[in-house]
Amino acid sequence: MAASQQMYPASYIGADVSSAFPEGFTVRPMEKGDFAKGFLKCLEDLTFMGNVTEDEFNERWDEIYNGGKGPYYYVVLEFEGRIVGTGIVVAEKKFIHNRAVVGHIEEVCIAKQHQGKGLGLLMMRALNSVAESAGCTKTILNCSQEKEKFYEKCGYTESGMEMVHYITDFRTPPHTP
């Protein structure tokens, strides 16, 4: 596939949201070629990444790419040819609540050198725009207590608590059949 293959239609990010980013910053759907633009390097400012090769990146892309039909909707922020921000909406289709679709927002990251510019708030607007375009009835996320105030600024409210049960050591890649 071409390096410019987008994960979903760019129209999922509303024009009002796209135009709100400062000059020089482009918000868009993730593309298969984003490995070379530092997509994983950006995520290192968020969490442990491991040593993911370009082949492994492309393998994961091929696993999750579905011609724009979801459920994975990565948003990236590009500046001067580099990925400096990202986040994902995972659209979970349910049977409850009249077959609702819930958008799980994950992996929200703005590169350290671009933090403090309001880009995180704009990234959240972009993610919520994508969630709405994907048919989600609400979006939810988990965050640390130190990030709670930021997400409140984005319109989120506390709703319960998170619990976790680890199946494997998170540093060990999962086995894919």
Image (cartoon, rainbow, N blue to C red):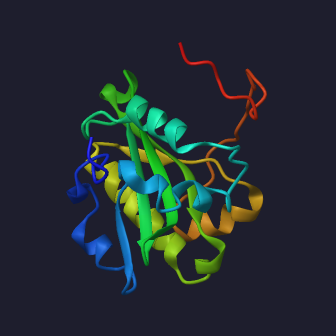
Rendered location of residue 44, percent (x, y): 67, 57
Q: Quadrant of the N terminus?
A: top left
For residue 95, above or below residue 24:
above
Q: Is residue 129 left or right of residue 176?
A: left
**Towards the viewer: 63 or 23:** 63
Q: How many marks?
A: 0
Rendered location of residue 20, percent (x, y): 34, 80
* Residue sitting at the far top: 177
**Towards the viewer: 102 or 11:** 11
**Towards the viewer: 56 or 69:** 56
**Towards the viewer: 49 or 85:** 49
* Residue sitting at the far bottom: 23
The residue shown at (50%, 75%) is 119
The residue shown at (34%, 32%) is 100
Q: Is residue 32 left or right of residue 50?
A: left
The residue shown at (62%, 69%) is 150
Q: Is residue 134 left or right of residue 50?
A: left
The residue shown at (74%, 29%) is 172
For residue 150, above or below residue 140:
below
Can residue 155 be seen here? The reply is no
Can residue 95 be seen here? The reply is yes
Rendered location of residue 117, percent (x, y): 55, 84
Rendered location of residue 51, percent (x, y): 68, 44
